[in-house]
Amino acid sequence: MNGIVNMSRREFLMAGAAFGGSFVLGFPLAPSSSSQSGTLPPNRTIMPNAFIRIALDDTVTIIVNKSEMGQGVYTSLPMIVAEELDADWSSIRVESAPVNPAYNHTEWGVQGTGGSTSIRTSWKQLATAGASARAMLIAAAARTWKVDPSTCRTEKGFVVHEPSAKRLSYGQLVKEAAYMVPPEKVSLKNSRNYTLIGRPVPRLDTPQKTNGKAIFGVDVSIPGMLTALVARSPVFGGKAKSFSAEKAKAIAGVKAVVEVESGIAVITDGFWPAQKGREALEIDWDEGPLAKLDSRQQRQHYAALGQQSGVVAFQRGDVEQATVKGTKKVEAVYEGPYLAHAPMEPLNCVVDFRPDGCDIWTGTQMQTSDRNAAAKILGLPPEKVNLHTTLLGGGFGRRAVGDSHFVKEAAQIARAIQKPVKVLWTREDDIRGGYYRPAVYTVLKGALDAQGSPVVWKQNIVSQSILKGTPFGATMKTDLDPTQVEGAADSPYDVPNVLVDYHMAPAGVPVLWWRSVGHSFTAFAKEGFIDELAHAAGADPYRYRRRLLAKHPRQQAVLDMAAEKSGWGKPSVPGRYRGIAIHESFGSIVAQVAEVSVSQAGTVRVHRVVCAIDCGRIVNPDTIAAQMESGIVFGLSAALYGEITFKNGRVEQSNFLDYPILKIDEMPVVETHIVLNQEEPGGVGEPGVPPIAPAVVNAIFAATGKRIRQLPISKTDLRKT
């Protein structure tokens, strides 16, 4: 449909041709006296929050205010701008936005990336920016030709005068366009007229990532830069009582050893001297209150909490009375371990601190808070700290930390040594460094009526809070962390009597959002338990779900697509069995059917995953398919192998050797099918993760008759006797 977007001149700002011979547009924008008057001096450039830059050579640079960590925003967001701008896609270039309030997330109020929100929160903003720029270019051409703007149109980077067939490229219009007044309102395209959005478009960042020119944080190198590694307490919350650096300083290349808030930093002229120097440190640690933390004892504590009433997250009907009347009772406990994010590129940060300012290069998902935290440590005004967001070699939430710890650490070291420094985390540092997906213990109780329909759903969730004690905790009015009950407190299944409550487990282990956050385990419990109810009712798992989703036609449509495309109900390849799951998260609905075999020795092999998604209006179907595949391999790695455990306060895992991810020869064939509609856009970065674990364990049940309720799957003995 056509959309009319109202905007005042106060909401748009443009810069003159003096900015490298370019025309700059931004949205939303601060007031400008020159834009109010309709004229701009030819040598004046105003560029707060500019999203579009058109150069004399016809290149169009889109300034992207989201972090590119593999999810494709350096292509999908420019596609939105280019569509409304009618730009030539081959002319599009991309730059990462600097830190500026005008680039803030439209919902968060700070600049950042996460929650699968990039498309959802940027579409209207960027479409309006593109459409407004297009209108101004048309006005510039009309003034040049002295014709009515209504007689002009745009196509692939040109303004065309219909009656005379005259053409001017956007680059040729730069100087004239710099004097145009932003329109009061613009019309957005009817989706039927899209020429770019909705089509598969190759990613703009692929060439540089394949030819080695792409710059990730770990690649940054500046003149005079030193390298630092930090020895941190082996137990979370521990502190160094004392240390000796004598042996470390004796290693060639070691320049300094300094104590910072997080531990002892060894500063050298390269990685290997830093590694050797850190190993040579002699540190006496005060291990603190978690020195005896043990995963087995923690599980027992969680189990005890799971038998007690918690803070009510959602309630409907009377579960106690309905349970008494139920003809069949089903009870189960579902458990998930701590999980590390394990991005391929471990954490890193480069800080170049000078008396008059600072430059920081890092792959971050939280630009504003990281910049401000560094500025405070360095004693600089925030505007004197330039944070450059590099490409991220994976994020999954790990680089969206509320306390900015890895940036603060680098700033403290740079302040101490007064030289540029790159702080690196090894893979072991990253795996043992905390900020995990919380461990969770979920007690479920259900009751069926005589027809096999569920009349009771009672769920008690025990886990640590992500929000409590952080800047984000201000949103919590009680000890109910919404991130830990999402996907459970809002389940779409039609059950008349529901109680979902939450127990906040003791803190201490650093936890954080992990790709799909609470949905990563609430989907496992919800979709595993609904399968158990279907089995107890003697019903087909797909048909049972479909009946309970009668009030949710979009969910039914996605479920139907996954079932149909997978051949549900038809014979599968001999020795293979199917499991199904559906879950809504981040504005999108995803259903998956996993096709699984279990060998005589108990080895699980996932051969095929059929994935259906309804994410509303789409930008790039290739990105959607890629993100579904990515979410499936990420979630499947965790379901099969992922587990962080503690003994004597220490993390027992260290690297991919004992915290494995799926190998290429284990990757199933993934088929992605998209439900096409014009609903509001949903996210795609995370919603592919939640359904995969329950789909697989449900398939394992079909194959073996054994229910897996505790992850990872590899902990369960599935050997056939």
Image (cartoon, rainbow, N blue to C red):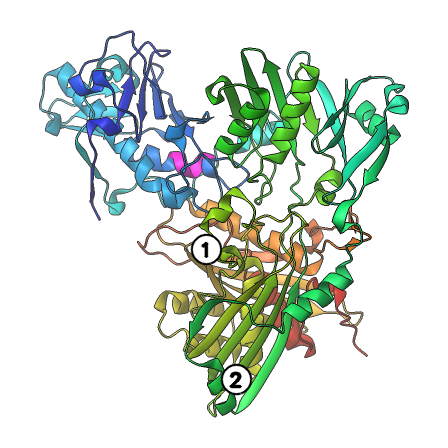
Residue found at x 25% / y 23% = 31
Q: Is residue 392 left or right of residue 602?
A: left
Residue 21, placed above or below residue 521: above
Q: Which residue is mark 1?
A: 477
The label nearer to you, 1 versus 2, is 1
Residue 563: x and y in percent read 48, 70
Q: Which residues are magenta?
A: 74-78
Q: Callout 2, which amino acid? A: Ala
* Viewer can see residue 214: no
Residue found at x 66% / y 12% = 223
Residue found at x 62% / y 29% = 408
Q: Which residue is mark 2?
A: 447
Looking at the picture, tell me which residue is in the foreground, 701 or 172. Answer: 701
Asked where in the image residue 358 lies, by quadrant, the reply is: top right
Q: Is residue 95 left or right of residue 606?
A: left
Residue 454: x and y in percent read 48, 82
Looking at the picture, tell me which residue is in the foreground, 634 or 608. Answer: 634
Tell me the SS state at disc 2: strand
Q: CA distance from mark 1 to mark 2?
A: 32 Å
Judged by its main secondary structure, the magenta piece is helix
Q: Callout 1, which amino acid? A: Lys
